[in-house]
């Protein structure tokens, strides 16, 4: 079930938000501690969805700063008025133990805003004693692996429990609440109306993660990277899962330490991962098997979990080549062989592109900010390298940017001076956010053929999806979904 907390600070707004939330949520939480002079009778009257009444004190992360007796008297009144649920803090529960509550379920809650302790089961056992119908244990995730502690708690419990982690690292426990086994999850009515850190909006929960389709048996996939919050991969893969009828969900994993993550997440069945910056290379050490192409490239962007064994693949290289070959064809040229290529960057993407182009017989020169890295890559591939300050592109057939220069939010930067661009050139920018970078705008102005990173992204996402499910998705659907998410336009 999805519960929307009402965080308005006056009665009129609270009533409006309560009505708006009732149209979408399964349960509405009235946060009396936010509302100035709350009239509980009015708030409960006419509400079309079940209600949780909460009056959180400052010590548990709420806003009620008055006397404890006054605070709890609102909860007693809620029981008298037959509210569906009240939420009472674990250290105040004795104050209502004599109050008959036949029509109201008692949620006994405990919040930890600084960490996720190891003894969650012990806390659960303590909280479930006495008058608790439902136990609520909310902690703060300092690291993504803290979510596993909550998952393990929820696998062990024998009575209804609401549990998830707060903070950016805890978002997955909010999204995967059915898989984890939590009684409900919270979502804000809209951005800016959150009642706790890491709470995402109900709109995002429905549109990006399609929680309405979730059940406890669904397969989990996800993106390993840092940062991951702006990635468009969740909306793409979740749309594909929905359209192609797979009972699966894809979520972002913000990973700081790849070794801890891989070890701890073996406890939660995750069927496959995408891997992005900065873990594409380091993840190789923690996999059970690596595809020969990924081994050669020294980078993995896709992981498949086959019966508990993690297998690594790389779909970037093929995706970049398909993109270039397509634009090359459109430009009336039938092969990449013999083409003079300037490749900017010597990181993971540049590496995939350099090896792929070498196999197609292209003449590549690598330029990189850190020249030593360019030289080492060029030696491995068997091509040339030059210092960045020697960059002169005028003789090139194709220029490829495989650096993040020009990526959102630095959208007015370009790695190549416009004066170097000539009309006969093909310019390929691997960046896909924005869809058209400054480099591509400049190139278009100069009459070059241009192609952006979105096409490469589409091909690599499709190849990933096929590795996980065995089915090739529609490239048009990926493009439509990605374009809509990136530009807000159809
Ligand atoms: P990476 O492994 O971290 O490598 C980044 C490269 O960019 C390095 O060569 C780095 O140079 C260079 N660089 C970073 N900041 C720079 C700056 N301010 N000025 C000049 N050079 C700079 O990252 P990656 O995975 O290769 O990704 C690189 C780009 O490719 C990103 O923009 C990413 O969005 C794009 N990409 C796109 C797709 C797609 O599907 N469209 C897939 C993968 C990657 P140093 O060696 O000097 O640090």
Image (spheres, grey):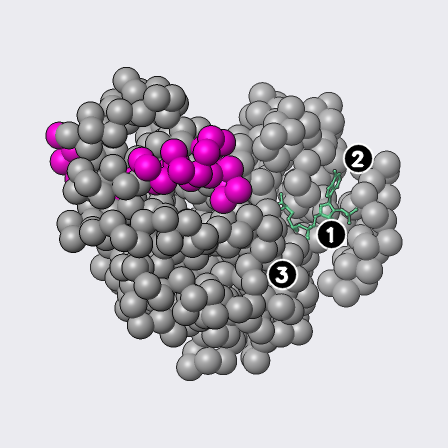
Tell me the SS state at disc 1.
loop
Residue 314, image x, y percentages: 55, 64
Question: Mark 3 = which residue?
Answer: 280
Quarter of the rendering containing residue 136: bottom left
> On the image, numbered disc 2 is attached to which residue?
392
Does label 2 or label 1 sit earlier along the sequence?
1
- Assess mark 3: CB under 8 A from ligand 1? yes
- CA–CA distance in space, label 3 to label 2: 30 Å
Q: Earlier in the sequence, mark 3 or mark 2?
A: 3
The residue stretch that appears in magenta: 46-74
Which mark is nearer the camera, 3 or 2? 3
Q: Residues within 10 Å of mark 3 (few under 14, many from 20)?
A: many
Q: Tell me if label 3 and label 2 are in contact, CB under 8 Å.
A: no
Dot 1 or dot 3: first in sequence order is: 3
User: Ligand 1 near label 1 (Cβ, under 8 Å)?
Assistant: yes
Q: Which residue is mark 1?
A: 346
Is residue 326 visible from the viewing direction of this image?
Answer: no
């Amino acid at each position: 079930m999805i519960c929307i907390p009402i965080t308005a600070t006056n009665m009129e707004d609270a009533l409006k938000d309560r009505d708006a939330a009732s149209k979408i949520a399964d349960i509405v939480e009235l946060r009396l501690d936010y509302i100035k002079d709350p009239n509980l009778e009015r708030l409960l009257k006419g509400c079309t969805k079940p209600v949780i009444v909460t009056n959180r004190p400052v010590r548990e992360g709420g806003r009620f700063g008055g006397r404890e007796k006054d605070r709890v008297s609102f909860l007693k009144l809620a029981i008298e008025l037959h509210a569906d649920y009240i939420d009472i803090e674990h250290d105040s529960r004795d104050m209502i133990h004599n109050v008959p509550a036949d029509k109201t379920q008692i949620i006994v809650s405990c919040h930890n805003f600084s960490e996720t302790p190891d003894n969650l089961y012990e806390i659960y056992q303590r909280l479930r004693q006495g008058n608790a119908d439902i136990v609520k244990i909310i902690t703060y995730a300092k690291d993504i692996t803290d979510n596993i502690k909550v998952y393990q708690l929820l696998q062990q419990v024998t009575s209804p429990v609401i549990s998830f982690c707060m903070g950016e690292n805890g978002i997955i426990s909010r999204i995967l609440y059915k898989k984890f086994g939590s009684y409900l999850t919270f979502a804000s009515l809209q951005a800016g109306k959150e009642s706790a850190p890491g709470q995402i909006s109900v709109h995002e929960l429905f549109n990006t993660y399609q929680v309405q389709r979730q059940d406890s048996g669904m397969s989990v996939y996800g993106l390993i990277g840092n940062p991951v919050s702006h990635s468009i991969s969740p909306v793409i893969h979740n749309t594909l899962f929905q359209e192609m009828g797979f009972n699966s969900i894809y979520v972002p994993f913000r990973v700081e330490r790849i070794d801890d993550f891989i070890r701890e997440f073996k406890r939660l069945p995750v069927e496959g991962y995408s891997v992005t910056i900065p873990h594409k290379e380091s993840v190789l050490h923690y996999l059970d098997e690596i595809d020969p192409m990924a081994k050669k490239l020294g980078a993995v962007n896709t992981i498949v979990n086959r019966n508990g064994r993690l297998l690594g693949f790389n779909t970037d290289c093929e995706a970049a080549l398909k993109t270039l070959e397509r634009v090359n064809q459109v430009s009336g040229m039938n092969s990449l062989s013999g083409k003079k290529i300037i490749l900017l960057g010597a990181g993971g993407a540049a590496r995939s592109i350099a090896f792929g182009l070498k196999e197609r017989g292209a003449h590549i020169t690598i330029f990189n900010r850190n020249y030593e890295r360019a030289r080492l890559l060029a030696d491995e591939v068997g091509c040339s390298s030059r210092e960045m300050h020697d960059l002169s592109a005028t003789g090139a057939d194709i220029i490829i940017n495989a650096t993040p220069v020009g990526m959102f939010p630095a959208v007015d930067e370009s790695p190549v001076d416009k004066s170097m661009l000539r009309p006969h050139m093909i310019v390929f920018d691997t960046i896909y956010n924005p869809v058209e970078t400054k480099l591509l705008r400049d190139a278009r102005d100069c009459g070059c053929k241009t192609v952006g990173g979105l096409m490469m992204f589409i091909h690599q996402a499709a190849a990933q999806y096929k590795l996980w499910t065995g089915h090739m998705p529609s490239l048009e659907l990926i493009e439509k979904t990605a374009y809509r998410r990136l530009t807000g336009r159809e």
